[in-house]
Amino acid sequence: MGRILTEKDVEAAVLGGSVYAAGGGGWADHGRMLGYAAVSIGKPELVPVEELDENDWIATAAAIGAPASTTPWEMRGVDYIKAVQLLEDALGEKLTGLMVGQNGKSSTLNGWLPSAVLGLKVIDAVGDVRAHPTGDMGSIGLAGSPEPMIQTAVGGNRAENRYIELVTRGATARVSPILRTASDMSGGFIASCRNPVRAGYVRRHAALGGISLALTLGEAIIAAQARGPSAVIDAIVRTTGGAILAQGPISRKAVTYTSEAFDVGTVTLETGDVLHVMNEYMAVDDAHGTRRATFPDVITTLSARGEPLSVGQLAEGMEVFVLHVPKSVIPLSSSVLDPAVYPHVEKTMGIELARYALSEEG
């Protein structure tokens, strides 16, 4: 059964999404802006994909870029709506619903506003339960597809004349980098609607129930807040089915922003544990170089207050807890199990991921 998303769901989505943001996933305030606008302007409805007709069209509402970086990004709610309208115009048919490519501080709510305004459903499915650096990782198995797909991007810093509207068609792997370049040119963060597919395809390939997971986690965090920070951390660990992998002060942060709109580098704890970053935390090695966690596992840093911290918020000397949720306890989409999505990320980061990510263990 579907549920109407209301004002109380906005903070739950932001808080739960912030944990699944895995160090990335946008801005919490941006998520609140999208959520409150959606629930005040209409009645966005969260529905399982099973309730749709097999042939209904679903597209992915997304935000592209690395907004943790010090870039002049500007993205308005109307940009998400315009991106959907441009995609429907290009498709020549109406969409029934919107899913998102990943959970995150704002990305969990990316579909709410355009759905509320345009009368679409918010589909309870995600391209990946956690946030990830490339569109391909949330593309539900389309990364290696030769089929031409439609992708749109809208947004940019108006004062600097960086506003862009873009409609592209082509194989996903060919057009995704174009949208990332547009994001960089627009100021580092841009709204997108992309990859319209039938509901039957989403049911077979997406991580189903991913929005509900974020909402349930957010509700648990809210319920624990009055009991203090340790209760919040306990609630996060218990609700996600994860564990605290490491904790301690940050001894070194070496992360740089690239022209591809990625934040890439490492964060090292005084324990010697190393978090490997490409917008999000993609892997953790211990002091001896032994791999302890790898995407699509959820890897998140929490402050001593139990607040999920993005990579951009981290500074040397800060005390952090590293949450690890193994991939075995979360729904996985076909895109995180697709070998084609890993080489670009491995090359950018200079570490192995696929060998661990695609193994049965964990």
Image: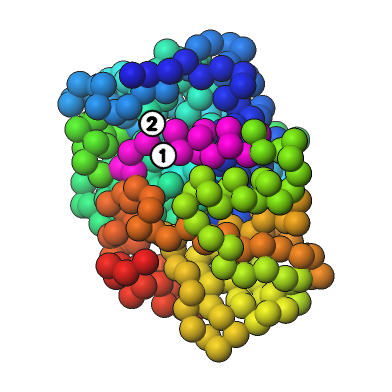
Q: Quadrant of the C terminus?
A: bottom left
Query: Could you tell me the amino acid type at mark 1?
Result: Gly
Q: Whole-percent x and y of residue 357?
A: 36, 67
Are the two marked residues, 2 and 1, in contact with CB atoms closer than 8 angstroms?
A: yes
Label 2: state its secondary structure: strand
Where does the image place residue 213, in percent across and percent down from the top left? Answer: 45, 38
- On the question of residue 252 being in view, the answer is no
Q: Residue at x 55, y 89 (%)?
A: 288
Is 213 included in the stretch rendered in magenta? yes
Residue at which label 1 appears:
210
Answer left or right for 218 relative to 269. left
Q: Position of residue 289 (x, y in %)?
A: 53, 86
At label 2, the amino acid type is Asp
Label 1 sits on a secondary structure element that is: helix
Residue 120 visible at all: yes
Residue 124's disc number: 2
Q: Residue 297, relative to residue 239: is it above or below?
A: below
Q: In this rendering, is residue 188 above or below 266?
A: above
Q: Is residue 26 left or right of residue 318?
A: left
Q: Which segment is the magenta one?
A: 206-222
Name which of mark 2 and mark 1 comes first in the sequence: 2
Q: Quadrant of residue 45?
A: top left
- Residue at 30% in and 34% down: 196
> From the viewer's perspective, is 4 left or right of 70?
left
**Vertical placement of 273 versus 196: above or below?**
below
